[in-house]
Amino acid sequence: MFKILQKTVSTGTVTADYPAGPAKISERFRGRPNFDFNKWTDARPAVEVCPTGAISLSDKGDSRKVTVDYGLCVFCGLCADASSNQAVRITQEFELATPDRRNLVLTAEYTLNADRTHHTLRKVDRQLVNAETDVESLGQKARETIQKILGRSLAIREVDAGSCNGCELEIVALNNPVHDIERFGIQFVASPRHADMLLVTGPVTRNMELALLKTHRAMAEPKVVVAVGACGISGGIFGVNYASIGGVDHVLPVDVYIPGCPPRPQALLHGILLAVGRLAERLHKRLISLRVAMTVEISAFSNGSNDEGVEQPLSRLPVKSKEGVALPRSLT
């Protein structure tokens, strides 16, 4: 016992400052590939080496449309190796979680030379935006939202719908002393009936589709669904085939997408905190619908009247049987 206490005191606090401070990232970490569309002279080499089809192109006459989908990207870095002039560069950006799948897609249009290389950049559609750039304030708002809405901790039910377990390793790391997700009032639970959030990893295999649906149906409203990793967003390297349906949104409505293969613990934390805001929106809408329903009930209650024209509660109004005899409501 004394040795444990001595070790605890000598070790001190090991919990990372993130999101209050910047994340400590290894120099070898590969994050989002950044595309300099102005310098990109030819997208074909990157398209050929991309293992998931995250980079695709379509040629029409002397024009070309290049599409980059971060929801399919596994951050392998092959596109950067295949591209010249440093047009594609691997960064260490990981805070890519978004509530809108379309935010993960970039498109660029080029005019072509005779050799089918890029001549002029005609148009760039930069839809990639961070839903919340101030992660520190996001964490603070998450604490306040959880306390205000739920009055307790946020409960997460995690479901592996068919992953390689890479995402599971990062999720497990959220509970260790370094990342300590419980400091935000967030904890993982075994039963979906206790959960507020459904965290889904892997492409949805056909064998797990029914189990995933049952888990979602067992959760009480309001609830949110978070798709984790490239597989959870789009099917990733597995795609859609005889055994896999693809992304989670092919089965369930998804509220937040967290790109990566696998997303690091800080990326998961960023996406979960973002989903807390979505949960607040759901609860607000539910409260509005309940108020409307109560208003209708009160209106119906006040419209009940007896023969003398005096209003009385609906529960006291007589109910007639099939023979036309008035019966007490306790007998109906």
Image: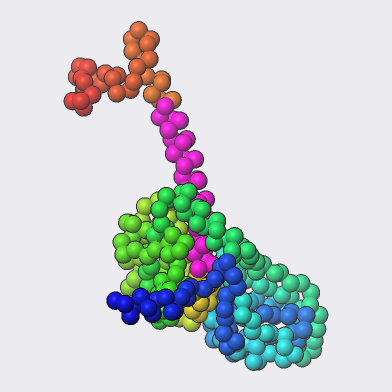
> In the rendered image, is residue 8 in sight?
yes
What residue lies at 62% left-to-right and 71% top-to-bottom?
Answer: 105
What residue lies at 66% left-to-right and 72% top-to-bottom?
Answer: 106
Q: Is residue 114 above or below residue 321?
A: below
The spot of residue 234 in percent (x, y) is 50, 73
Q: Is residue 299 above or below residue 34?
A: above
Residue closer to the observer: 120 or 127: 127
Residue that extends furthest to the top in the rendered view of this protein:
308
Q: Split into 4 quadrants, where in the image is the C terminus? A: top left
> In the rendered image, is residue 257 in sight?
no
Instruction: Considering the whole magenta stretch, tell me its main secondary structure.
Output: helix
- Is residue 151 magenta-colored? no
Left or right, residue 159 beside residue 111: left
The spot of residue 207 in percent (x, y) is 32, 73
- Is residue 296 magenta-colored? yes
Total numbered circles: 0
Q: In this view, does 116 lie above or below 259?
A: below
What residue lies at 73% left-to-right and 80% top-to-bottom?
Answer: 36
Q: Split into 4 quadrants, where in the image is the N terminus? A: bottom left
What residue lies at 26% left-to-right and 18% top-to-bottom?
Answer: 318
Residue closer to the observer: 8 or 38: 8
Task: Give the colouring mode of the picture.
Answer: rainbow
For residue 171, what is the image quadrant? bottom left
The magenta span reads: 269-298
Residue closer to the observer: 124 or 2: 2
For residue 153, what is the image quadrant? bottom left
Left or right, residue 225 beside residue 68: left
Left or right, residue 70 beside residue 168: right
